[in-house]
Amino acid sequence: MKKRTTSILQLIMILSIFTLINGVNAQEWTQKADMINPRLFFSVSIVDKEIYVIGGTLGNPIDSVEAYVPETNKWVKKASITSPRAGVVTCEVGRKIYAIGGWDGQNPALGMVEEYDPKTDTWTQKADMPTPRSFFAAVAAEGKIYAIGGIAQNVGPVLAVVEEYDPSIDTWTQKADMPHPRSGAASAVFRNKIYLIGGVPTVQGPVGKTVQEYDPSTDTWTQKTDMPTPRTALAVSVLNAKIYAIGGTAQVQGPGLSTVEIYDPLSDTWEASVDMPTARVFLGAGTVNSKIYAIGGVAEGLGPKILPTVEEFSLGALNVAARDKILTLWGNIKRVPTHKLIHK
C-alpha cells in the first residue's frame, strides 16, 4: 500500500512538471523589424542563417535585394538583381541563390535565371528556364531545383509543366507534369520529396486545398490529404519535420488569412496552429534557428497597402531560469524520503 501511494504521488509531481514545461513551450508570434522597402510579388531564400528578400514590385518591378539577420533583428541592403523582376521565384543550392522567372513590366513572363553568391554579393546570368512563367512554385531537392506550374501570361492558361534545373551543369530537363495545373501554390521539401500545397487551377479560381507529393527519384506524383482551408498565394515553411501553411487567401483577390495549419508528411495529417497576428496574402516565409519568419504581403488581394511586416513564430523553449527551477524541483522530489511522501 505504501509503495502504491508513493508511486501515485510521484506520478502527480511528474505530471505537474510536464504541465510547467508545456506552459513555457507555448507557441507564439513576435513582431520583428520591418523590411527596409515594402514590396509585393517578391521571393525569399535563406543562406547561412540570413533571409534574403529578392525583387518584387511597388507598382513597377524592382531590383532591390535585402537580407534579414535574425540574430541582430536588422535588415541589410545587398547587390540588386541584374534585371528588375516581380513574381520571381528563388531557391538555394550550395549556398547560392537562383532567381527564376517572373515578369519585368514589358514581358508577361520570363524564363530568366540569375545566380547570386552571398560571399561576393554578385549576380551571374545562367541558362534560361525553357517555359517562361510567373506565379509558379519552386523548391530545391538533392541539389536540383524543380519549377512547378504557374502561368505564362496574366490571363492564363495555368500550367502543369514541371522542369528540373541542375546548377552544377547549368541545364534544364523536362519532368512529368503535375496531375492538375496550378498557379499560386506553395512548395516545400521533406526527406527529398516535394509537397505542392494549395493554389488555383485557373486564374479565376476556385482556390484549392489540394496537396500533392512529387518524388524526384521516380518522377511520379501522389495525391495526399487535403489542407483543411483552401489557400492560394500562401507561404510555407518546414519546422521540426512538419510543413506550416501560412496566410494566403481562400478566394481570388479576397482578404488575407491569418490562420496557420500544420501538415505532417509522416502521418499525412493536418492540425491547426496559432494564428499569425497580421492576416495577409502574397507573403514570404523561411525558417532559421527553429523559428519561422513571415515577411511582407498585403492585407487583401491586390489591395493598396503593401506591408513591410515581419513576424517570428516560435514553438517556445525552456529559458535558463525555468529549466533550473524544474531541475531543482525534480531533485528535491527525488531526495524526499519515501515515508514523508505518505500521509499517515
Image (cartoon, rainbow, N blue to C red):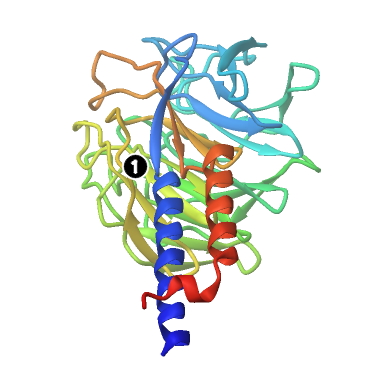
Quarter of the figure that contains the C terminus: bottom left
Question: What residue appears at the point 36 percent right and 39 percent down from the top-left corner?
Answer: 234
| In this rendering, position of residue 232 left or right of residue 53 | left
Counting labels gives: 1
The residue at the far bottom in this view is 1
Using the image as rendered, state which of residue 287 and residue 130 is in the foreground.
Answer: 287
Q: Amino acid at mark 1?
A: Pro
Using the image as rendered, state which of residue 295 and residue 324 is in the foreground.
Answer: 324
Residue at mark 1: 157
Q: Position of residue 123 (x, y in %)?
A: 72, 19
Quadrant assignment, res 250: top left
Q: Does residue 122 appear in the picture of this structure?
A: yes
Using the image as rendered, state which of residue 309 and residue 43 is in the foreground.
Answer: 309
Q: Position of residue 109 (x, y in %)?
A: 47, 28
* Vertical position of residue 315 compared to residue 134: above or below: below
Q: Secondary structure at mark 1?
A: loop
Using the image as rendered, state which of residue 13 and residue 305 is in the foreground.
Answer: 13
Question: What residue appears at the point 54 percent right and 22 percent down from the top-left corner?
Answer: 53
Q: Position of residue 296 (x, y in %)?
A: 40, 23
* Vertical position of residue 144 compared to residue 44: above or below: below
Quadrant assignment, res 128: top right
The residue at the far front in this view is 344
* Vertical position of residue 59 compared to residue 131: above or below: above
